[in-house]
Image: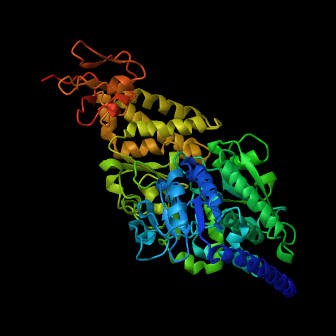
Amino acid sequence: MKTTGLQSVVSTFREIKSRAESQWQELCNSGKPVVMVGAATCGRAAGALGVIRAIKDEVKKHKLDCPVVEVGCMGHCYAEPIVIISKPGYPPICYGHVNKVIAERLIREFILGDDPCLEFVLGALEANELVPSLSDFPRARFEKKIILKNCGHIDPEQIEHYLANGGYTALVKALQMPPEVIINEVGRSGLRGRGGAGFPTGQKWEICRNAPGRPKYVICNGDEGDPGAFMDRAILESDPHSVIEGMIIAGYAIGARYGYIYVRAEYPLAVHRVRIALRQARKLNLLGKNILGSDFSFDIRLFQGSGAFVCGEETALIASLEGEPGIPHHRPPYPATDGLYGKPTLINNVKTLAYIRHIIDNGAEWFASTGTEESKGTAVFALAGKIVNTGLVEVPMGTTLRQVIFDVGSGMQNGKRFKAVQIGGPSGGCLPESALDLPIDFDSLTDAGAMMGSGGMIVLDEDDCMVEIARYFLEFTQRESCGQCTFCRLGTKQMLEVLDEITKGQGRIEDIDMLSRLAEDIKAGSLCGLGKTAPNPVLSTLRHFRDEYEAHIKEGRCPALMCRDLIAYYIIPEKCERSCDACVGSCTTEAISANKKRIKVIDQEKCVKCGTCLSACPPQYNAVVRLSPPSEVPASK
């Protein structure tokens, strides 16, 4: 690019950035109170839209000059809906579990008055003496936010907010660098693909750039379909421009002019916000023909996938983009040399692309200084399951599972005992308590029988049956199999049938060895990553929880009291309070009745073992019990 062209790029961007910063300063330093509400999917599911309406109505009622801004996900999903109020003279205060009534109080008592309503405070965004700071939370010692830095703090539908917080400066910097230097910088950073495989990103970019053929394409893989995973969705909903900027830089580096963002249609809010972001970027000439007056042109289209898990595999994704069934193809050739429409195609995950702007802005050494020798940077996880503080977390690679679960996530719910963590999605593995001090990185997790995956982390407690967990995840992958490979199509089906029999108490001891053999054959004989990793939950549970399989088979007993065919509910007569009918009223199948002495009895023929009666029984009586094996009726005293 000529020097005059570079000067034009810089001056054009300087004008755009100056206008954005003025708008941001007007919002943050206007002397007005500002209300921000977390309105990503997690917030909306908890009632954020109702909270926003209540706040706007109250602001209008009192004729307040108070902007109400919708932001993305802060990561504290357990506390949604979240409201942040910035009022002159006070630090920005974050409120959790806000409902309509609380929202109205915050406007009346804090915005109109001077009562910060401390009883609803989650924490302050800045250190102060008034309320505890979020930076004082135990999780803050372990978190290091890079790609989640903007999430929950800017309006994702306002490109000016992104620009005012450093957005697109990396693109301008990249346009002044030779493409080979950019690729070298990404390579030296040590960034590995965050979609699950962990392939070196710089190496993939170099292969694609050097591959013959035109045009070349860049694809963002946003087909996140793992149960319990929502990292990519949250980034696209909360900071879509970070992904777009990463794609533009990637396009410049490999010599591409076209890109696609592949997002599953089940993510309507992500689709909506990405579409707005693309339109805004084009309007400011950050996307499209001759970006910022340079000689580089690049445009992006949004493609909505129909929700097939297998389309997360890159060749299946390409087939879907081409209008074909989402079925994986043999590799090699790899997409980097023979991809979309037979042309060189760079496919990266949402998180991988979101890192690029930070690497270009801060340098390879900066990024490589975080993490481990072989796994650089940070890892983003979606904490779900039986953990106190569910949500998003970004920690340096090398942080231990114990630190993430017990320090960041605050440990187990209801004082239950930790049992296992399913990491890496349905194709990952279940790791026991003995693995809690394992560092989180690509290689350590693989050696332990799990995998990094895209970042799902489901925490399990003592009430979870590991045989049923393995069956559940295998059922998912078996259902999502495209059916192309015999090993995957029939092998997973056979494994699922065996697991079904074990959870019903109909298994044989030789089934354990059969499961192991089938699993290894499926891994060896399947074409794509779905089939090769589908047996992982079974293999990891066999490795770490073999005693539970044996209890189901030898004793007809589910130690976790989870498998319905191996449990039964009974009412202990001596504990049953005659005047209490809580269990009777809760039973939807009318399986519970009272005899002449008003002692309740459960009809085992009618009982569907839903456990509602156990939950309904008042704790002071504790008369309902769940037993396994179901034949062990409690003796009366």
Left or right of 617: which side holds 586? Answer: right
Left or right of 527: which side holds 334? Answer: right
Estimate the x, y position of residue 394 in percent, counting from the top left: 50, 64
Q: Residue furthest top?
A: 596
Q: Identify which residue, 634 or 424, lies in the foreground.
A: 634
Assign the N terminus to one quadrant of the image.
bottom right
Assign the C terminus to one quadrant of the image.
top left
**In this figure, which colouring scheme has been used for the structure?**
rainbow
Estimate the x, y position of residue 237 in percent, counting from the top left: 64, 57
The answer to whether residue 499 is above or below residue 316 is above
Write down the quadrant of residue 146 in the picture. Answer: bottom right
Q: Identify which residue, 458 or 156, lies in the foreground.
A: 156
Left or right of 315: which side holds 409? Answer: left
The answer to whether residue 527 is above or below residue 148 is above
Q: Identify which residue, 249 or 92, lies in the foreground.
A: 92
Report the residue at 68% width, 70% height from top.
161
Q: Residue furthest front?
A: 62
Estimate the x, y position of residue 503 in percent, counting from the top left: 39, 30
The answer to whether residue 328 is above or below residue 440 is above
Please state the total of marks drawn on the protein image.
Answer: 0
Estimate the x, y position of residue 273 in percent, counting from the top left: 70, 56
Q: Does residue 439 appear in the picture of this structure?
A: yes
Left or right of 105: which side holds 333? Answer: right
Report the residue at 79% width, 43% height from top.
323
Q: Does residue 333 appear in the picture of this structure?
A: no
Report the residue at 39% width, 53% height from top.
388
Report the residue at 67% width, 53% height from top.
270
The answer to whether residue 240 is above or below residue 486 is below
